[in-house]
Image (cartoon, coloured by chain):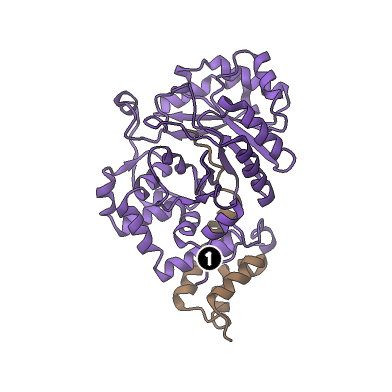
Chain colours: A purple, B brown
Amino acid sequence: MHCDNTVHVYRGTAPRYDAVLLSITERCHVGCAHCGFIGTKREREATLDELRQWTGQLCEYGIPRLILTGGEPFERLDAMEIAVRTAASRIPIVATFTSSFWGTSQAEARYVLRQLAGLNQLYLSTDAFHQQRVPFENVHNVIDAALAEGLPYITLCITYSNDLELADVKAHYARWGSTVTFHEDRVIPTPYLSRRVMERQASGVAVSSSHYGRTCYLQTPLINPNGDLYACHSGKAAAHRAFTDSPYFLGNLREKTFAEIVHLASRRWDYQYLRTQGPKGVAELVERSPAVLHEVGRTEFTTACDMCFSILKTHAGTEALRVQVHRPEVQDSVNIRLAIGLGEDPITE
Amino acid sequence: MALTFADAMRLAAKDPKFAADLVQNPQNYQQTFNLSAQQVQGLKTASLNDVLAHAAGKGEAALYVG
């Protein structure tokens, strides 16, 4: 193996991230049956000034991709405009999620997109759940409008219950060929989803470290509308209950800057364990302490995120993590992956 | 003062060529950095391709919206 071409990318002390999710609002009038926000008040909002400040901090940090999310970001077009304007030309990729509810015609969709000059990627949620509320035609309009406006990246995000459902949704986009890309994920079950939704789910997989990799969405932290910064999109669960005592919580942007929070977090073994060991590392916790699953209440999971979050939201899960990261060989492994994999300084006591 | 595992990691974080060689041939650095047998084994176990999956950006941006 030729060294110069294999160890590369980032050499620095601060954590490197692939992207940051900025939740503009928790509001969404669409009301999909599989939504993780079912059962919450969805009342948290950032002010326009906060969104400008937080986006500016992400620019200064050097984030390569900003992803606006929600809720439904297009419920607050004024907030989106500020975030996109602040990030444009300072962050290479500025993206947003949307249900495409606003794409009632191609002309309307083009009009809306023109308010967001600098946006260059769309993640369009499209699946059996969204399309019970928003016609496929809206998504089609947004795709055509985005292409007409020169947006280079369009990703269709399909959350599915089973393979048949996935194939059916994808068939609605055959005519765009490779112009669009797909991202597919299983539904993440929550106690708030209806029995009708849960009955459609294909079975999950049992916890085994051989099923999972060490990389996942943990290189993409999430900022909630109240300023809480979480290690990944699992932080959206904080809409249900206080979640600041979980290993996913990093800090609050109303109290410290993004750079200050992630610098402090980068010295935490629990956080760096999750970043460097990923879902495989969480599965290894269960293999060392199988009793952890008793508190979880189930043994099969749809996705890696479902597995990790279900385990780490329990007391038994966080305790198993606390014990795991005190083991010297585990700390060595975290440091090896930080230094050699990510080019970041090791944690030293 | 004797060099340690942490020194090796700090150097690896800054020097890609050293990092690659360290994970491929850890025994060559055992004396220099006073690596324990467990640490040498840990470096051997962390295969280069596996470790570098992080650096190659294979951890996708978060796409889950709900």
- How far across and how far down the image is residue A312, in percent? 37, 50
Which amino acid does the dot numbered 1 rest on?
Ile
Which residue is under mark 1? A336
Where is residue A257 drawn, in percent x and y?
A: 60, 52
Q: Which residue is nearer to you in this view: A276 or A314?
A: A314
Residue visible at 40% across and 28% down?
Answer: A34
Q: Position of residue B52 (x, y in %)?
A: 58, 57
Considering depth in this image, is B28 or A237 the residue closer to the camera?
Answer: A237
**B9 relative to A332 in the view: left or right:** right
In this picture, residue A99 sits left or right of residue A285: right
Q: Position of residue A123 (x, y in %)?
A: 58, 31
Horizontal side of A46 relative to A61 (left or right) equals left
Above or below: residue A121 compared with residue A138: below
The residue shown at (57%, 85%) is: B2
Quarter-of-image position of residue B31? bottom right
Question: Can the viewer see residue A73 in this picture?
Answer: yes
Give the camera-side residue of A57 and A214.
Answer: A57
Q: Residue furthest right?
A: A89
Query: Could you tell whether A145 is left or right of A75 in the image?
Result: right
A11 versus A114 height, above or below: below
Please identify the quadrant where the N terminus of chain A is shown.
bottom right
Asked whether the viewer can see residue B21, the reply is no
